[in-house]
Image (spheres, grey):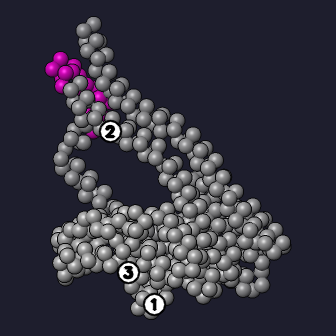
Amino acid sequence: MNTYDYRAKTPAGNLSIGNLDAADRNSAVELLRKRGLYPIEVNKISNLDKSLKFSTSKKVSLKEISIFCKQFYTMIDAGVTVIASLDMLRKQTENPKLAEITGKVFEDVQKGMSLSEAMKLHSDVFPTIVTSMMEIGEVSGNLDVVLKRLASYIEKENKVRQKIKTATVYPKVLATIAFTVIIFMMIVVVPNFVDMFSRMGAELPLPTRIILGISNLIKNIFFILGAVITIAVLSMVLKKFKKTYRGKYLISSISLKTPVVGKITQKIIASRFSRTLSLLLKTGVPLIQALEVVSNLLNNLLVAEGLAKAREEIKRGLDLAESLAAVNIFPVMVIHMISIGEESGSIDSVVEKVADFYDDELDSAIGRLLSMLEPIMIVIIAVVVGAIVISMILPIFSVYQEIN
C-alpha cells in the first residue's frame, strides 16, 4: 500500500488537497472519483517526503477552525447527518492537515465513536473549547446551535489574538533592523576605522578599545558557536521549566504583575473569561462546570487557582460575583457587571457585553503601549549607535592633539 498526495476539484469547484492510501496511482484516481472529486494531480509520496511533509505540515489556524464550524453548522442546520457532513468537510477543506484530521474523525465516527470523543483524539488541532462544546451539543441535541455560537466565539477570539500579534510586529521589525545595523557597524565599520587610526600611529582611547574588543569578540567563530550553544541550552531548560508548576506559576505571576504589560494581560484574561463563560452559559452548561472549562482555557495558573477557589465558594452557597471578588483576580468592573447579571437573571448576556467592552479596552491599551515603545526603542538605538560613532570620533581628536 502506497501513499499518494493529491490535488482535486470538488463538484462545487473548490480545491481539495490531501493524501490517501492506495495500491497504485490508478487505484488512487479511482478512489478520488468515488468520493466525488475530480483529480488534477496525483503523486506518490516517498518515505523521505512523508517525514518532510509531517515535519512541515501546515498548522491549523483559529480562523480555519471557525470556518470549519460555520460549514459544519450550515450542513447540520440543513438536516445533513453528522457523518455525511464530516464526509463533505474532509473533501472541501483546503488546509491539508485539517482535511486529514477531519477524515480521521469521519472514520472514527463511522466506527461508532461519538463526535466529541473522535475530536478529542486530535487536541493539537481542535482546542478544548471546541471538543467540550461538541460534547455539550451531542448531549443536549442542539449541535447546530452550539456550532453556530462556537463559530462566532472562535472568530472573535481570533480577532483578539490578531490584535496582539499585530501589536508585536512593529517592535520586532524595529529591533531586527537595529540589531542588523549595529552588527554591521561592529563587524565592518569599526575594524576599518581602527585599522586606519592604527596605521597613523594614533593611540586609541579607552572607549574605542572597548568597542574594538566587542567587535573582535563578535567576529570570533568560537564566540559565535558558544553563544549559539548557550542560547540553545537555555531555550531547552526554559522550555522544560515552563512546564513545571514553579515555571507556570512564575510566568503567570510575571505576566500579571509587570507594569503596563500586566494591565494588558488582565484585559485579555477578562475578555476571554467573559466571552467563554457567556458561550457556555448560553449553551446550558452549569456554572461550576463552565468555570472549570474556562480555567483550562486561560493558560494562567494564578487565574486557574483563583477560579478553583471560586468554584469551592460557589458550592458553599456564595454568588459568582462574591466568589470572584474574594479571590481578587478580575477588575472591579467585571465583578460589578456579573453581580448585576446575577440580580437580573441575565448573566450570560451581561458577561458577553463585558467581553466586548474589554475588547475595545484592549485596542486602546495596545495603542498606548505602542506609543510608549516607539520612542523608548528609538532612544535605546540612538544611544547604542551614538556610543559606537563617538568611539570612532575620539581617535580623530587624539590625532589632532598630537599634530598640534
Name the amino acid, label 3.
Lys
**One can see residue 272 in this view:** yes
Nearest the viewer among 142 and 22 is: 22
In what element is the residue under mark 3?
helix
Amino acid type at circle 1 is Met
Name the chief secondary structure element in magenta. helix
Write down the region rendered in magenta: 194-214
Q: Quadrant of the C terminus?
A: top left
Secondary element under disc 1, as helix, strand or loop, is loop
Q: Give the percent coordinates (x, y) of residue 375.
A: 52, 35
- Disc 2 residue type? Thr
What residue is shown at x 29% (from left), y 38% (from top)?
Answer: 183
Question: Where residue 219 sits: x, y (%)?
Answer: 21, 41
Q: How busy is the neighbourhood of tag 3: few (under 14 within 10 Å), some, or many (20 plus)?
A: some
| Residue 240 visible | no
Residues at circles 3 and 2 in contact by the CB criterion of under 8 Å: no
